[in-house]
Structures are given as C-alpha cells and as structure tokens.
Image (cartoon, grey):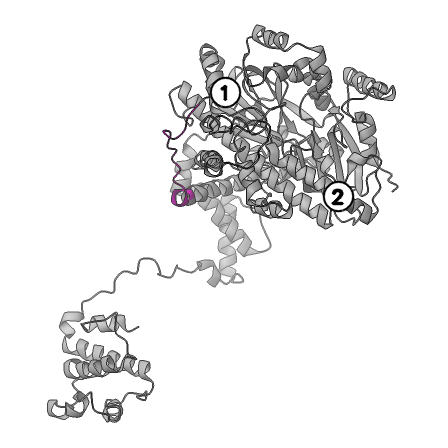
Amino acid sequence: MVSDSKGIFYVNDPLEKLMFEELRNACRGGGFGGFLPAMKQIGNVAALPGIVHKSIGLPDVHSGYGFAIGNMAAFDMSDPTSVVSPGGVGFDINCGVRLLRTNLDEGDVQPVKEQLAQALFDHIPVGGGFQGGHTHERQGPGRSTGDGGGLVPEGRLRLGRGQGALRGVRQDAAGRPQQGLFEGQEERPAAVPVALHGLGRGRLTLVLYLTQLGTLGAGNHYAEIQVVDEIYNDYAAKKMGIDHKGQVCVMIHSGSRGLGHQVATDALVAMEKAMKRDKITVNDRQLACARVTSEEGQDYLKGMAAAGNYAWVNRASMTFLTRQAFAKVFTTTPDDLDMHVIYDVSHNIAKVEEHMVDGKQKTLLVHRKGSTRAFPPHHPLIAVDYQLTGQPVLIGGTMGTCSYVLTGTEQGMTETFGTTCHGAGRALSRAKSRRNLDFQDVLDRLADQGIAIRVASPKLVMEEAPESYKNVTDVVNTCHDAGISKKAIKLRPIAVIKG
Amino acid sequence: MFRRKLTALDYHNPSGFDCKDETEFRNFIVWLEDQKIRHYKIEDRGNLRNIHSSDWPKFFEKYVQDVSCPFSAQERPETVDWLLGLAVRFEYGDNVDKYKDCKPEAASNDTEKPSDPLINLDSNNPDFKAGVMALANLLQIQRHDDYLVMLKAIRILIQERLTPEAIAKASQSKEGLPVSLDKHILGFDTGDATLNEAAQILRLLHIEELRELQTRINEAIVAVQAIIADPRTDYRLGKVGR
C-alpha cells in the first residue's frame, strides 16, 4: 500500500513543544495508554488506502485509538480501495457540543448560581454506565447495575425511563423547529433498527441503550453555564442571538453513550476479518478498517449513523431538561428565557461530503475524530441564518477554562476540507492525571474561581482538570491564525455539572 | 351513485339506492313512472307495476323503448341515469317558476383560477412591444431581447415595490442588521469588481429566498406537529433529583 499522501499538523510554539515531548517520551518507551504518539498516528493514517489530500492534525491533537484525536482524513468514495475506519471516528460516535443561549445576564444568574447548578444536576442524569438514568431511584436495592453489569433490563421500568427522555425531546422540539441547526440532517432515523439488526442484536440492545438516553455520562462530558466573555465578531454573534458581554449560555457536551461504543467495538471485530479477506495492510493494528463499499464498511456506516442519531436525541433531551431546570429556578417559561439552540456540532463522525480536490469536485468520506466540521459562508449544508457568517463551531474548553465559538472559513474549506479543532485536547494521560493531581485541590481551585460545581464521581475529577489538558486558548488561536476558522465569541464558565 | 338526482327527486333513499338489487330496482322504476315520468296512462301501467312477474324484464324493455331511451334495458346503470335525467327534466318543466331563480351554489374551492393573462399575449405584436418598452423606460428597467422577460421583470417590480401592500411593508421598520456589502465574503472572485458586487447581491437575494423557504418549512412543521404531537409532560410522574 503506497500512498503519496502526507501528514501535517497545526501548532503554535507551546503546542509544538507538547507534540515533540510526546514523541520523545514514546521513543524512550514511555508512551501512554498503549497508543502511539499522535505524530506517528497522523503519519500512519496518511498511508491508509484511498486517502486524498493530507492526514491533518488539528492543534488539539493527541493520541487515541488508531487515529489521533484531533485528526481529519478524507477518502475518495469513487476509489474502490478507499476505506472507512472506526478508529477514525472514535468510540463515542457523534460525541459533540451543543450551545443554548438565554436572554439572561450574568447579574441575573450569579445570585442563584448554586440553585441553578443544583437544579441542572437534579434534572440531568449524570454518571457512567447505566447509573443515573431517569428512574434510577425507583430501582430497588440490588437492582442497580453498576457499570453495565447484569445487563438484562428491568423491562417496562427501564424502558419507561428512555421513553420519558423521548417525550421530553418531542416536547422540546414541538413548536420550535430547529431550522437545520444540527450538522447531521442526512442521518436517517430508520438507521437505528437496521444497524442493530446488522449487529446481530435486537430489541434487547435497543431497550438497553434507551435507558441511557438523556443522560450526560461520565468522562469529559459536562453541562456548563457560561457567560459571554468576549465578542470578536459582532455580526456573527448577533446572528447567533448573542448581543452583549455577560449574556448567559448553556453548553452541553455529550455523546452516544454505550451505543456508540458498542457499534465501534463490533465493527472493529468484523473489520479485522475483512482486512484479511481484502488484503488491506496498515501500519498499526488499531487502524482496523474496511472498504467503504464492502458489507462491513456499509454496516459500520449504518451503525454509526444510528449512534449519531442517538447522540443528537441525547443532547436534545438534555436540552429539554436544561430548559426545565432554568424555567424552574426563574419561575418562567423556557421560551420567555429565549432558550434556543445556537448550534450543535459533532466531534466524532465520518461524513460523505463534496469537496474540491485539485480543482475537481469529488465525493469524499471525511473522518473527523476530535475535530469539528467548519463550513464557510454560503455553504449549502449550513442553516440559512448562518449563510453569511459561516457555520458556528463550538469549542468546549475543560472544566474551569473558557470555551469558544468560531466560524468556518473559505480557507479552511480548501486546506482542511472544512475542519477545525474541537477542544483543548489532552496533554496528560488519564492515569498520569490521577497520579499527579489531587481531586480536592482541583475542586478547591474551581471554587476559588467562583465556579459552582456538581460532580457525580469527584475522584475522577483530576482526569478532567485543566492541568491535564492543552491550553484551549493556544489551540483556538492557532486555528484562528492559520485561518482555518475565525474566533467569534469567548465564553467562561460559572457553573459546571459533571458525571 | 345516483345520489344527487335521487335527492333532487325526493326519492326516499337517495344514498342507499342499489340498482343491482332486483326488487329495489323494480320498485324504483314503478315509483319513477308513477310519480315523475308518467309516460303511460295510469291504466296502462299494470304490467310495469307487476314487479313479481317473470315477464317484468320484457315490459321494462318495452318501457325503455317507449320513453325513447338511447340505452338498452341491459345497460342498467346507464338506463337508470338517463331515466333519472328525464325525470329531473319533467320535474323542472312542471315547476319552472319555482326553480328558475335558483342560483348555482357558489362553488367555493374548485372554481378554475383565472389563467395567466400573459399566456395569451402575442409578444411579437408591435403594440405590445411598444407598451412594454414604455413601461420599462418609466420604471427604469434594463432592456432585454425577450419582451416577455421584460414584462415579467416589470410585474415583479410592481408587485414587490409598488403595490399598496409592498408600500405598506416598506414603510414598516424592518428587523435586521444593516451590514455593508463589501464586508461579506463572496467565496469566489470573478476578477471584476462590478461583477463581484453583482454576485454578492445575487447571493443576498438567494439567502432571502432561502429564509422565506425555511420560514414556510417551519410553519409546515408546526402545522404537522399540531396534529401529530400534543406533547405535554405529566410532571407528577417524574421525580427530580436523587
């Protein structure tokens, strides 16, 4: 398999230092999490069959399973040898961020910050595994399932939980069409049963994952109350309904929970066989892939679409819960609080898109893992109200650091196939963070910053501490300076809830 | 299938009538002749009235011929329809004064829309060309080789700018942010400043159309949701917090 494609990555000086440090550690045999260093991973991806343009590392790139997190790679759909790789999407399929605006000002929220954080924590079920669902407290002792142990669902009781979440989505959506504010309208709802059927599972699995619907999950997932700290682009901000500093927003960061993981794991197993059959060789065993046209490839894409839909419904249902929590604290209606979705982006997905390659329009399968689609102004796939500004790109920071809203650019469209960074990007491994940091220190520091925090599992907080991550401002500025996306708004957190 | 005519004739069962039911059919024919058509004299109607006779079809065939029905007795639905039409005509003839002032009910929906007057225009007529030119000069509209295209442009301009509604709309303060044209990213370069500006204007017009479309889509979604979804959460069932 010879490919003349190259791997590149975007950095500024401090980020470059981190990249080379990671490489150096790996060469000394350090490495972390059993992953190759990101720089090698970017190179390995550049050697995959059917890749066009380059394998691109965004400024927040760090090593992950097979593909680095923060890697974009596009494959030519018209090339029969082109592949799709679950590692290029990630295990948390359609993990992403959604931003809601409110018409509240920081002054309205500060006095009730603690109540608001508590209300959010009460409304949005958090925590890993199958805990923390909508009817968790109704399950008697001994029936709680820990981390997915005893998977047989308690029939109606648990199904009812999922349905409750769905009802919320319906109520949330009714009367307020979303105006194409999601990236993934091409995903077909019918894909869910199809995909599960393809995976050799049936109703049981569906019921099982329904119970996780409308739950935040653990890890780096969070819901944050944020205030506008800086507006870089007045016009774009106004188009998003943001008109002054201090305006309050809510950011929800979650994904497809267990379903995405299931889809990815099953696909990896199937693809190992397909690789032998089709004689696909790759530089890293973790880069398991299958030809896009093969049965395994198509099965994975369907399963991925299903998990993608699941994640969107998941975030939609938490939107509903957030609106309810705010309405309760401010004793008014969500609509009076102007709580509308600004945008919803996916960080982990592969999509079929049209791009110009060497002056010719081509249909590509664009893998974006830990990176965000950032389409320029006038692109037909972005909502009409953002036609002049370019697609909003939501960049979630880490606990206690700021978040950004960027917009897509024409330059990004040609250079990175309309792709930019997704967040801060991990600098320390989870294990290293746990060794080096104390959770109480982390919590205390957040409190000192005036950030209300509710955490379901505080002992895991150090994994997500700002110290474990690259500096999000470095990351965003690198994208801005490189021209692959432009800064529009900066947000800082005043309350965080986490799994 | 004969509901309207039967209703007009005050038949006792206009919507349930089935001409294939032999008894009902024979009774119906007797009723029609007795009450409405009265082609035979009363004393001559005996054979027709004897509906249980096995010869009845023969007499009915003769009756059909006697009233000069163009259909044969075997083509039953056609015959029935024709006879009903005849009866309605007699009914009207007997009560001209009663019915002559009846206005047809204003058909509410299915009136034909007036066809586009532009279709019947002869665009090669010199009078037409002169008229269009005069209008175009008056409204400062660009010349175009096709006079029909020019006429369309004139119509759009008048509709969008000069109708009372358009004027009323324009006088209302419009929501939105005024932004200078050159600030927008065109996305491509034609190499000509004037062309670029024109392209930018086209972009904006296109976006306005898209917005209009999106608004209609939203309205359609809301309308459908009003039917399919009445989402109300029963908050008593939920338990918040742990």
The first of marks 2 and 1 along the sequence is 1
The answer to whether A155 appears left or right of A373 in the picture is left
**What type of secondary structure mainly makes up the magenta span?**
loop
Residue B53, quarter of the rendered image: bottom left
**In the rendering, at what x and y percent does residue A115 appear?**
45, 14
Separation (CA) of disc 2 from disc 1: 40 Å
* Residue corresponding to mark 2: A271
Which residue corresponds to the image point at 41% horizontal and 45% vertical from the top-left?
A: B228
Identify which amino acid the numbered label 1 is placed on.
Answer: Phe
Identify which amino acid the numbered label 2 is placed on.
Answer: Met
Q: Chain of mark 1?
A: A
Q: Magenta stretch?
A: B225-240
Q: Which mark is residue A121?
A: 1
Which residue corresponds to the image point at 19% horizontal and 73% vertical from the top-left?
A: B11
Residue closest to the eye, B116 or B137: B116
The reply to whether residue A181 is visible in this rendering is: no
The reply to whether residue B47 is visible in this rendering is: yes
